[in-house]
Image (cartoon, rainbow, N blue to C red):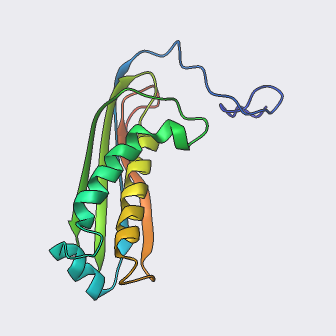
C-alpha cells in the first residue's frame, strides 16, 4: 500500500522489521523553545519556583523521556540508548532545550531526541505554570541526524 513502511499490504499498522539492518552508530539532535513571562523567566533562572529547580528537573525529565520513547510512540522500536545529553539555555524571552541522543543499533534516534525535548519543555511548563499559564512551546524540530541508510540530515 503506497510504500509506507508502517503499513502492511492490507493497510494495517505494523512495526517495521529492522532485523536485517546493520547496527551502526546513529545520532540525532533536536531542539525546542518555551516562551515565558519575565516573572517566570526570573524564577526559572534563579531556581526559585515553588516546585524547585526547573532546569535541573527538566534535564532529568528529558533524559528519562528519551529512554521511554517506545512506551509513548506506538510504532517506535525500543532502543539501547548509548547517550542522552539535554542542554537547557535561558534566553531573553524563554528557554531553549536541545537534546542529543546516540545509539548503536539498526534504527535511528530522531524520535528519542524529539521526545526528550518535548518532555523537558513540558516539565518547565509544569513547574512554572503557577506564574505564567500563557507559556508557549514552539519550534520543536529535528536539527540533525547521522547514521543509517538514509544518511545524514542537517536542518
Spot the residue most to the front. 50
Q: Nearer the viewer, residue 131 or 118?
A: 131
Quarter of the image where one finds residue 47? bottom left
Q: As drawn, is 134 to the left or to the right of 143?
A: right
Task: Pinpoint residue 151: horizontal percent, then vertical percent.
Answer: 41, 32
Spot the residue most to the top. 20
Look at the image and tell me in which quarter the N terminus lies: top right
Task: Pinpoint residue 108: horizontal percent, then vertical percent.
Answer: 43, 32
Q: Which residue is rendered at x = 35% and y = 67% of the image?
A: 124
Quarter of the image where one finds residue 33? bottom left
Q: As drawn, is 81 to the left or to the right of 45?
A: right
Task: Pinpoint residue 79: horizontal percent, then vertical percent.
Answer: 43, 28
Image height of 129 relative to 9, above or below = below
Q: Nearer the viewer, residue 75 or 50?
A: 50
Q: As drawn, is 90 to the left or to the right of 146?
A: left
Q: Which residue is rendered at x = 39% and y = 17% of the image?
A: 23
Question: From where the camera sits, is residue 37 visible?
Answer: yes
Spot the residue most to the right. 10
How many marks overall? 0
Q: Nearer the viewer, residue 42 or 26?
A: 42
Task: Pinpoint residue 63: horizontal percent, then vertical percent.
Answer: 32, 45
Q: Which residue is rendered at x = 52% and y = 29% of the image?
A: 77
Q: Which residue is rendered at x = 61% and y = 25% of the image?
A: 16
Amino acid at each position: 500500500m503506497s510504500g509506507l513502511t508502517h503499513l502492511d499490504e492490507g493497510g494495517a499498522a505494523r512495526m517495521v522489521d529492522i532485523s536485517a539492518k546493520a547496527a551502526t552508530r546513529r545520532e540525532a539532535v533536536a531542539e525546542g523553545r518555551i516562551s515565558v513571562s519575565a516573572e517566570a523567566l526570573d524564577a526559572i533562572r534563579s531556581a526559585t519556583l515553588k516546585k524547585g529547580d526547573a532546569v535541573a528537573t527538566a534535564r532529568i525529565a528529558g533524559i528519562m523521556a528519551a529512554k521511554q520513547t517506545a512506551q509513548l510512540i506506538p510504532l517506535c522500536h525500543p532502543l539501547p540508548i548509548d547517550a542522552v545529553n539535554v542542554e537547557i539555555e535561558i534566553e531573553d524571552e524563554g528557554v531553549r532545550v536541545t537534546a542529543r541522543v546516540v545509539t548503536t543499533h539498526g534504527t535511528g534516534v530522531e524520535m528519542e531526541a524529539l521526545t526528550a525535548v518535548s518532555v523537558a519543555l513540558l516539565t518547565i511548563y509544569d513547574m512554572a505554570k503557577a506564574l505564567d499559564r500563557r507559556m508557549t512551546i514552539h519550534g520543536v524540530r529535528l536539527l540533525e541526524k547521522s547514521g543509517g541508510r538514509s544518511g545524514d540530515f542537517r536542518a
